[in-house]
Amino acid sequence: MKRQNYISWDEYFMGISLLSAQRSKDSNTQVGACIVSEENKILSVGYNGMPTGCADDDMPWDRDGAFLDTKYPFVCHAELNAILNRSSGSLKNARIYVSLFPCNECAKAIIQSGIKEVVYWENKYADTDATKASMKMFGLAGVKLRQYIPTGREITIRL
């Protein structure tokens, strides 16, 4: 008899997204992303962090202050990293699982890469103009949006 209590595809891929977020060095916000094909194969993963070659210890991580003294002009978001981390092939018709609803800049990259569905954990910035712009672009481009509904299943990873 086949095992019955295995995790669903959504649980699996959102779990990969949440685990990837734990690689982020950002002390305030950790975001992960997992891109999968129509055949449920992982194409790429990413998390929010500084660009390759920019040492984390030499970069600002503050949220407040002069623009160039904050993380905002420098950090690559998880979605963009996952798109750029793809080693070959197309992302056309793929799904992206993200722990935080994409900002407008990531929405543009998602749309341009051909991803057709965004599955997100939370949308804590729903009232911001950036998120409203994302929603508008996703709607116009026909990108499906779906909030992940946690099942309450608990999985422990011991390292």
Image: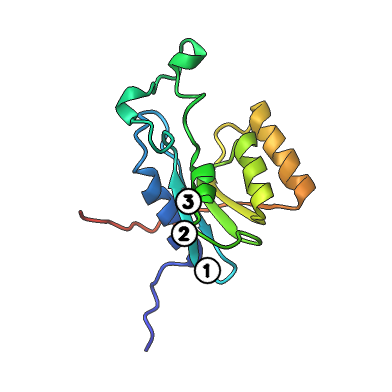
Query: How many marks are shown on the rendered structure?
Result: 3
**Please, which colouring scheme is shown?**
rainbow
The residue shown at (39%, 21%) is 60
Which amino acid, by three-letter code, is at mark 1? Asn
Q: State the residue position of label 3.
A: 85
The residue shown at (44%, 15%) is 69
Q: State the residue position of label 2.
A: 13
Q: Say what secondary structure mark 3 lies in.
A: helix
Q: Look at the picture and state if 138 lies above or below 73.
A: below
> Is 58 left, or right, of 10 in this rendering?
left
Q: Position of residue 149 (x, y in %)?
A: 53, 53
Q: Are marks 2 and 1 in contact (CB under 8 Å)?
A: yes
- Whole-number angstrom distance, CA of label 2 to CA of label 1: 9 Å
Q: Position of residue 121 (x, y in %)?
A: 51, 47
Q: Position of residue 56 (x, y in %)?
A: 33, 30
The residue shown at (50%, 24%) is 72
Residue 40 is marked as 1
- Whole-number angstrom distance, CA of label 1 to CA of label 3: 18 Å
Which amino acid, by three-letter code, is at mark 2? Phe
The disc, 2 or 1, on the residue closer to the chain's N-terminal end is 2
